[in-house]
Image (cartoon, grey):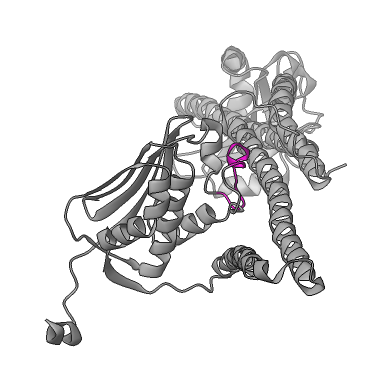
Amino acid sequence: MFKSVFVKYISAFMLINILSIFLSTSVITTLVNTYDENNKSRTLANIAYSVTTFIIDDYTTSGEISFIDYLNKSVYPIKPMLDSLDGNVENLVIFIADGDGNVKLIGGAPYSDTYAGADGIVSQGEELAYPASVTAELEGSNGISRNDTLEGFFEEKHFTYIHPIRTKSGNVVGSVMTCTMVSDMDELLEAMIKTIIMSTLWLMLAALIAVYFITERLVSPIRAMSRASRAFASGRFDVRVEVNGNDEVAELAAAFNNMANSLQHSTEVQRLFLANVSHDLRTPMTIIRGYIENIQSGAIPQDKVPHYLGVISTEVQRLSRLVTSLLDITKIQAGERKFDIKPFDICEMAREIIIFSEQRLEAKKLDVSFDAERDNMFVNADRGAIHQILSNICDNAIKFSKEGGRYEISIRDVGQKTVVSVYNEGIGIAAEELPYVFDRFYKSDKSRGLDKTGVGLGLFIARTIIEAHNETIKVESEYGKWCRFTFTLQKTNRPAPTNKETETQ
């Protein structure tokens, strides 16, 4: 189940959202609780301090009487004041106790009569006192803040603040305790948590729907690519992935389709290559075998034997060229071919190739042109490898030129590079085939009738050699009119003459 990227993504999204709800609820609850406790503690402390101040001031002016007698005497004036403070805190209850922690008067919230009579006075027969530990703590404290049941004093948790009432000598003669129930805050938090969870769940549902469609859009091309890859493995290269939009996924799908096009083209080229190589191997071998058998059997007259031996020699050379090309490819791919980079005159090489091709040029009545900036232009490269490239390109230019057409070799300096181009007028190359001209095993079907000796390896070798020199090669053409091959070489200065050359001069 979790092998699917889609399921993993959705599961991770849901887990993150659930953790976010839990963490946000915990954080909000803690913050609200802390804020409420601090706020109520300050409010309860302020009320307790105000009541304590009022009682001390009133007690001080009441004469030389005990604090307990003062409470008994002043209960009715104090009770209304306590009840009036109820508006500051909801459900506020105020307890006034003597020095031993015995509660004598209660005021504040309507439910204060739970602890005393309607008048707020605790009857003499009833005992309502602070725990002994609280009374002891008050002796050395300026106030006590609690959030509990006060050791069983209350049945439920309360926020409480107890302020001691001290005489001028510092003796604790009583205390004022302000408190309110916690349950109200719990109800508020419960409602708040429910609201947060419900709103978050709705938002998560909306986000889940959005993520579902977004994820599906991201994953569906990947699924399609997976299906296409399985089709490629079975030998079907015509499968393509639909490209939607212009984002990274669309770019990936487009790149995948380009790869599929390359694979399909490469497969087709290799198929044609095998057919071509089989034909090019079978034809000369059949000719060679046939002539040899005829010579051996005496079917060919003795005076004709030299002629047919020449034919056999030509066919052997053809086989040799094919094998050499295949060996060159093997060495290039294995990285075994090493290049001897030295300065040499590219113009001299071009003139040699033209002279060597003179008979073929005249046979086609081509308009030959050699255009160079200077008589001698030196480049830094492997002379033998560059001769192989230039002679191959020139040979193709002659082969595919129309009779009487223009044939030109041009050499120019451009910056630090020397640019060599070979132009011919003839059948050219179709636009759809231009991207594949330098591919391995490429051979245009349109040129099949003219190119009877090649197998589509020359230009692949040419590109590999040029790239090994860190240079570039390209082709331009207008089908049915002209074609131009261009490659670059590193420009260099004329090399210094050797001692032998100096002596000769």
Q: Residue 128: where, in percent of width, then height?
A: 76, 33
Q: Along the horizontal axis of the image, is 244 left or right of 494?
A: right
Above or below 375: residue 432: above
- The residue most toward the right is 1
Give percent across and percent down for residue 94: 64, 24
Q: Residue at x 33, y 58 (%)?
A: 355
- Left or right, 461 with respect to 347, comes to right
For the point 75% across and 39% down, the residue is 237
Nearer-the-camera pick, 100 or 93:
93
* Residue 101 visible within the image: no
Indicate the quadrant where residue 192 lies.
top right
Residue at horizontal 59 percent and vertical 45 percent from the top: 138
Is the stretch drawn in magenta largely helix, strand or loop? loop
How many numbered callouts?
Answer: 0
Between 223 and 40, the one lying in front of the other is: 223
Q: Is residue 336 above or below residue 71?
A: below
Quarter of the image where one finds residue 163: top right
Q: Which residues are magenta?
A: 439-449
Q: Position of residue 479 (x, y in %)?
A: 48, 30
